[in-house]
Amino acid sequence: DYASCKRLGSSYRALPKSFQQPKCTGRTPLCKEVLNDTWVSLPSWSEDSTFVSSKKTQYEEHIYRCEDERFELDVVLETNLATIRVLEAIQKKLSRLSAEDQAKFRLDNTLGGTSEVIHRKALQRIYADKAADIIDGLKKNPAVAVPIVLKRLKMKEEEW
């Protein structure tokens, strides 16, 4: 209960002197000097707070909705761009291989990136029901599939 603790503004409370800090063996002298072990942050809507939330107007609701939509679009664009970058790197790598090595070249579940999820989501967004087939094609025959998928991703980037 932080209600009786020393306050700093409306959001911060000092931990009681009786609070026992957890052991941390990885702290350096610099950590001890700069890290906060005294103050905790409480949200303004906390039960301890005297802040009373006001109802949002219709205009505020529209602004919040717009911000949410812009955030979602930003995530979509960045996911698409990350997939483009990965496939461009694969295409560049393939261009340096002989035809025989290109035929042997395969991709794993990360499709040449570091995440299985990001690129799969980007492809599912564009190819919907056919995404599994597209991903399978990228994994089994990247020399053929990468240029086609890359072209489609870039078209969607322009469209969005």
Image (cartoon, helix red, strand yellow):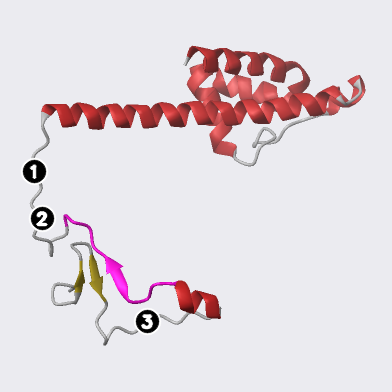
- Where in the figure is residue 54, as x and y percent of width and height? 8, 43
2 and 3 marks in contact (CB < 8 Å): no
- Residue 21's tag is 3
Q: Is residue 30 left or right of residue 104?
A: left
116 lies above or below 20: above
User: Counting residues from the N terminus, which is met first, the one under dot 2 or under dot 3?
Assistant: 3
Q: Amino acid type of disc 2?
A: Phe
Image quadrant in which you'd find residue 102: top right
**Magenta segment:** 35-45
Gap in angstroms between the C-alphas marked 2 and 3? 29 Å
| Residue tagged 1 | 54
Q: Is residue 88 highlighted in magenta?
A: no
Front residue (pair 49, 24)? 49
In the image, is residue 101 above or below residue 153?
Answer: below
| Residue for badge 2 | 51
Seen as rendered, the residue at the extreme bottom is 18
Q: Amino acid at mark 1?
A: Ser
Image: 26 above or below 127: below
- The amino acid beneath tag 3 is Gln
Tell me the quarter of the picture where residue 40 sits. Answer: bottom left
Q: CA distance from mark 2 to mark 1?
A: 9 Å
* In the image, residue 81 above or below residue 145: below
C-alpha gap between disc 1 and disc 3:
37 Å
Residue located at (19% from left, 76% from top):
6
Q: Could you tell me if residue 149 is visible in this image?
A: yes
Report the residue at 73% width, 29% height from top.
89
- Badge 3 element: loop
Q: Which label was assigned to residue 40?
A: none
